[in-house]
Amino acid sequence: MGLGGPWDAPDYGPEHIDAAADAVEAALSIGITRFDHADIYGRGKSEGVFGELLVRDASLRARIQIQSKVGIRLGEAGGFGHYDLSGKAILDGVEGTLRRLRTDYLDLLLLHRPDPLLDPAEVGDAVARLLADGAIRAIGVSNMSAAQMDALQDHLPVRLAADQLELSLRHHAFAESAVLVNHGDGASVSFPHGTLEHCMRHGIELQAWSPLAGGRYTGRPPAEASDADRATSALVAELAAAKGVTPEAIVLGWLMRHPARIGPVIGSANPARIRACAGAEAVAEAMTRAEWFALFQTARGQRVP
Ligand SMILES: NC(=O)c1ccc[n+]([C@@H]2O[C@H](COP(=O)([O-])OP(=O)(O)OC[C@H]3O[C@@H](n4cnc5c(N)ncnc54)[C@H](OP(=O)(O)O)[C@@H]3O)[C@@H](O)[C@H]2O)c1
């Protein structure tokens, strides 16, 4: 999302292509081979700059997987417009994405956000056409609940492959929804109950957006940091020092420790920070329940009931 320079700039320059190349190189160096896009990122510049990399290095496309999203329309002045998951918007969106990325296909297309006006049969027709044309190889969603996925699934020619949601040590409502069943505080939990379980049962990959919470616990605390934020940052640093890993690996490892095998979609464009994410998988494998709950309870600011 951060590639291609500022969203309000009219175009990207050579310096943005070089910066994107450095970020991609850093990602590949730690074994990351999948890249997340959306037609709106940088108002198209993120995909555009990435397409330049695919032209620069003809061998790159075969070594990576690319996913992108459609379904949000930007407004005239560059601000947010509205959602649009009509069949035409999906087909036009993918066409623009492939043109900017300079590739023939997406490994995975995600429907960016639930559109209240979405007609599942119309979406199903558009997706069937894209699959038949070879423009996309799989279909998934983003920010959708289990019920929304089910309603769509009935009209799709293939199984949904993924759901991308905001999940992190900071945005931990998914864990709250598990521990607060039949508890008074559960009424305030925003996470659609049962969505993780639905994905696990149906083999739908769970992807986490903003998994680093923008650096909240790993070196960029917000100006209005709470006591829980400060305590969480301290615990993350303490665990990182004890395990000889980076704070980023702890925060990502906490997510990946979940049996749903949550896959973090890291948003950094900084090569050093991307490399600092290496080791998260090993941290996840070794993370004890005591450590996982210590991080969760510190971030939520109180013990689980
Ligand atoms: N499906 C959706 O609705 C949706 C919504 C939002 C995002 N996404 C996807 O998810 C990806 C990740 O989201 P995200 O970028 O919001 O989240 P993130 O990975 O939690 O945070 C990355 C951002 O935080 C900054 N950052 C992290 N640690 C820092 C530190 N210690 N000091 C200073 N800055 C730090 C990074 O800056 P640097 O670049 O300088 O490292 C970068 O701007 C996006 O790129 C996008 O692909 C999807």
Image (cartoon, rainbow, N blue to C red):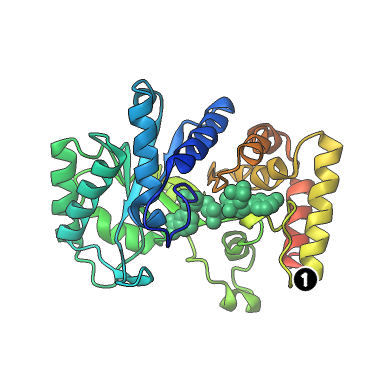
Left or right, 90 with reference to 176 = left
User: Which quadrant, please, contains the C terminus?
Assistant: bottom right
Q: Position of residue 274 (x, y in %)?
A: 61, 38
For the point 48% across and 39% down, the residue is 20
Q: Position of residue 258 (x, y in %)?
A: 60, 46
Frontmost residue, 156 versus 220 = 220
Residue flagged by tag 1: what amino acid is it?
Ser
Inspect this view and state whether residue 165 appears.
no
Image height of 23 relative to 291, above or below? above
Local SS, label 1: loop
- Find disc 1 in the rendering and name its residue: 226
Q: Position of residue 43 (x, y in %)?
A: 36, 57
Residue 72 location, x and y as percent? 32, 63
Residue 107 at least partly seen: yes
Please report the residue visible at 41 percent of the width from the left and 55 percent of the height from the top. Answer: 42
Q: Residues within 10 Å of mark 1 (few under 14, many from 20)?
A: few
Report the front residue among 210 and 73: 73
The residue lying at 17 percent from left, 44 percent from top is 130
The quadrant holding residue 167 is bottom right
Q: Is mark 1 within 8 Å of ligand 1?
A: no
